[in-house]
Amino acid sequence: MAKQDRAIRTRRAILTAAAKVFEERGYQAATITEILTTAGVTKGALYFHFQSKEDLAQGVLSEQDQRMVVPDRPSKVQQLVDVILLHAHRLQTDPMVRAGVRLSLDQQAKGLDRSGPFLHWGRIIGDLLEKAQAQGELLPHVVPSETADVIVGSFAGVQAMSQALSNYKDLPDRICALLRHLLPSVTLAPALAAVDLSPGRGAAVFAELAESLDQEEFPARAAG
Amino acid sequence: MAKQDRAIRTRRAILTAAAKVFEERGYQAATITEILTTAGVTKGALYFHFQSKEDLAQGVLSEQDQRMVVPDRPSKVQQLVDVILLHAHRLQTDPMVRAGVRLSLDQQAKGLDRSGPFLHWGRIIGDLLEKAQAQGELLPHVVPSETADVIVGSFAGVQAMSQALSNYKDLPDRICALLRHLLPSVTLAPALAAVDLSPGRGAAVFAELAESLDQEEFPARAAG
């Protein structure tokens, strides 16, 4: 059990180091040697967890969607908004999430399959839209998979713009503006009127979830 | 006159080479020496036109908004759609435009001010929205600058998603889907109903404009 804990912590240290090196150098220029040095682990430990640089990048890419699940809400449109604003909040505050999102937009990362996060998020958003549709919250013409793709793609760009213009300071405002522009085209007005779409919502959802999570899962946050 | 033509052609050759090298290596890893070799010009010629690597990158960044201006349309919403779909078409077909858009999303490009294209496009789209508002095509609550930012940011992400998932093959479809999701939240229904928002629109606008442009300005296209 203690041994398993240690393995989890080592894996996490390696991924944190990889995220840092990928952010600084970009995927193409990053080397495993540099990640080793930054993580302060042995070569054996690294290769026990990850086979290659691509494997490390896939680990960072998938970290952005781990461990924080918004609970069921009566309104599926609210749940969708919460998932998106929570992700924006984590992107603003968690270097690992940021590194994952940046990697997925690194168009110089040759040989790295960056489709994963787009498809993964597309499925999450698409599922929520299907549930919203089933309980009559959406306009009749909506095709959930198409709307999901529009949301995922536009989120990626709005975060990049926020990074370029304000280093993420205005991210919650920009994502709320995006949702205020997208949701009226797909949601029935009464369902939308009841939704909390304020810029502080992401931080509030994060606080709600963090309370219920074991501190052990957030060593960085527990320390900070 | 001939001398000036030669200077324009040399400048263009250097920018084309820079675009190629930036796309292959990323901004950070690209070197002026490599751009020199690719362009096949002298060091003196390059430094006559560009002072530094950043200067070259700014040249590529600003190429994406040059030379193709959609003429005035009676419906400003149609004009807005035409500007956006023309840009999508050029992104799909013109390596220089592609390189500029990618550079503006290159989060590893340290020391390169990437805000230019976001702000530039924000102004173009914002101006058109103000005109649309002035002639009563928009819903009363619309704030043109905010909507412009949402459009510019989401365009950037949807193009990145199209690149990651289909190497730009599905770009016109994705951008039309984006506009079908954004425009109903800002446009009066009768104004929107008259707008051509089909995926072939970008190529049609391009053909309309290319006819009226001097072939001299599109040496690559004239040769191809």
Image (cartoon, coloured by chain):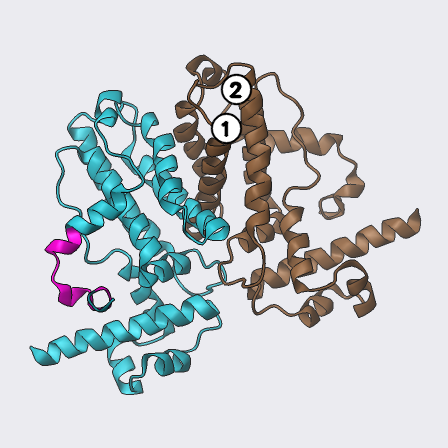
Chain colours: A cyan, B brown
**Extreme-left residue of the structure:** A1
Could one spot residue B167 in this view of the protein?
Answer: no
Quarter occupied by residue A54: bottom left
Q: Nearer the viewer, residue B141 or A32?
A: B141
Amino acid bearing label 2: Gln
Say which quadrant the C terminus of chain A sits in: bottom left
Direction from residue A105 to residue A189 in the image, left or right: left
Could one spot residue B156 in this view of the protein?
Answer: yes
Quarter occupied by residue A33: bottom left
What residue span does the magenta drawing correspond to? A209-221
Q: Are marks 2 and 1 in contact (CB under 8 Å)?
A: yes
Q: Nearer the viewer, residue A200 or A13?
A: A200
Query: What residue is shown with label 1?
Result: B144
Q: Earlier in the sequence, mark 2 or mark 1?
A: 2
**Location of residue B168 with respect to B137 vertically, above or below:** below
Residue at 77%, 42% (x, y): give it. Answer: B217
Direction from residue A59 to residue B54 in the image, left or right: right
